[in-house]
Every structure is written in C-alpha cells, then in structure tokens.
Amino acid sequence: DSGVTQTPKHLITATGQRVTLRCSPRSGDLSVYWYQQSLDQGLQFLIQYYNGEERAKGNILERFSAQQFPDLHSELNLSSLELGDSALYFCASSATGTSTDTQYFGPGTRLTVL
Amino acid sequence: AQKVTQAQTEISVVEKEDVTLDCVYETRDTTYYLFWYKQPPSGELVFLIRRNSFDEQNEISGRYSWNFQKSTSSFNFTITASQVVDSAVYFCALSEASGTYKYIFGTGTRLKVLA
C-alpha cells in the first residue's frame, strides 16, 4: 500500500459526459501528479500540482482540468468524454515535487467510456 | 531528447529461472534519476528502486538486482529464481534534474512466470 488513495476504483460513463476523479496524497506529501495509462499510449504524464499550485503540464487535453485543494487532495475533471478517453488514470504523490523525488502511485481509477 | 526504451515487450520464463529486463535511456542531463516500477495484474504501480546518475553501484534486494551502466546508458533489472508472483508488467522511468518534474516511462515489459 503506497498510502495514496484514489476514488472511485472504476467508473463507467457515456460519451459526452463529465466525471471527476479524486486523489489523496500520502501523508506529508505536497505534490500530486496525474498520469493516463492507455493501451496505445502507455503511461503519459498529464499534470502536476505542488501545494495547491500548478507546477508542470504534460499531454493534458483542454477538455481535462485538475486542481489541488488546501487539504492537498486533488481532483481531475474530464469533460465531453470520448471513447478514446477510456484508460487507467493514476495519481501519484511526492514529498517536494522536484525531480529528485520518488513518486508513489495510487491504485488508479479505471474509466470506461461507452 | 529524453527517452526510455524497453525493447522486450513480453518475456516468458519457467519458475526458478533467472530473468533480466532491459532498460536503455537517453538524456542530455548529467544529473538524472532512474526508477523501476512493477504493475501486477491488480493494476497498481509499485515502486521498486530509485538510482541517481552519480551512483553506479549495483544494488541487490532479495531476489532482485539492478545493474546501472552509464557507459551503455542502461539500467537493467534481474530477478533471480523467478516466482509466479513476479508475473507483472515492469516499467523503467527517467527523471531529469533540470526537467519539469515528470517521469518519462518506457513502454513496459510484461513478464510471465510459468509454474
């Protein structure tokens, strides 16, 4: 158990809908990262937050947004969902949010868009 | 450009065999970090090891060992006396000190250990 929690574990929805994925980092970690794992794209970095502020952006679509709240939990919002958004979404956390950190991953949320 | 290559897509071995998973990386940074993660069938990503670019000592942890060679830009992972529970997808990742804090993952190697 990494100490990172993600909810829900599974999510099934329809095209065009909007969903919110939630992540709680390990105790003491200030930085949260979101990754998407799909069969054809592998593990792709989406976005990073540190202590409530966006720090780095990766291959995140404009239909997707995220935020980190004062209690350090984070939410990833996916809207206007398409079939291709079906994937495993991971949240990771690290202590300081720098490249020297080890990132610890949550169990993931499996999103299926029908 | 930064890149991680795991050329072995899938490996099958029989229990108790030794197996080595290859990882080759590309980076222009002199300071960087390499990682291995395990993704069992349950789906979570489990951290295995972190190595910085200044530490070329090999590491052993139980049946797991890692061989880091800067000369060949490789960070290979060996499982000795493999067990069925080792069946998983293994990912190698790179993080550059001057980069934007993200990991670059390889495409993973699926290891199947047969009883």
Image (cartoon, coloured by chain):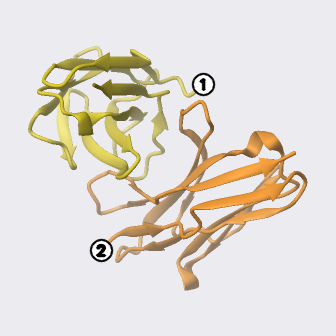
Chain colours: A yellow, B orange
Residue at 37% across, 43% down = A38
Q: Which chain does the numbered disc 1 sit on?
A: A
Q: Residue at x 47, y 24 (%)?
A: A4
- Kindly identify which residue carries mark 1: A1
- Position of the C terminus of chain A, as image quadrant, is top left
The answer to whether A74 is drawn above or below residue B65 in the figure is above
Q: Nearer the viewer, residue B78 or B27?
A: B78
* Badge 2: residue crowd in 10 Å (few <14, some 14–19, many ≥20): few
Q: Secondary structure at mark 2?
A: loop
Image quadrant holding the N terminus of chain A, namely top right
As measured in the structure, the alpha-carbon distance from the residue carrying label 1 to the one carrying label 2 is: 34 Å
Q: Residue furthest bottom?
A: B71
Chain of the residue under label 2: B
Give B30 or A39, whichever is nearer the viewer. Answer: A39
Dot 1 surroundings within 10 Å: few (below 14), some, or many (20 or more)?
few
Q: Report x, y in % for residue B29.
A: 36, 73
Q: Secondary structure at mark 1?
A: loop
How many tags in the picture? Answer: 2
Disc 1 marks a residue whose amino acid type is Asp
Location of residue A106 with respect to A42 vertically, above or below? above
Residue A73 seen in the current view: no
Q: Horizontal and vertical percent for residue A32?
A: 33, 32
Answer with left or right where residue A31 lies relative to residue B33.
left
On the question of residue A90 being in view, the answer is: yes
Residue marked by disc 2: B1
Name above or below for residue A67 compared with residue B98. above
Task: Residue at 51%, 69% (x, y): give it.
Answer: B53
Q: Position of residue A24 (x, y in %)?
A: 38, 19
Question: Same subunit under labels 1 and 2?
Answer: no
- The amino acid type, in three-letter code, at marker 2 is Ala
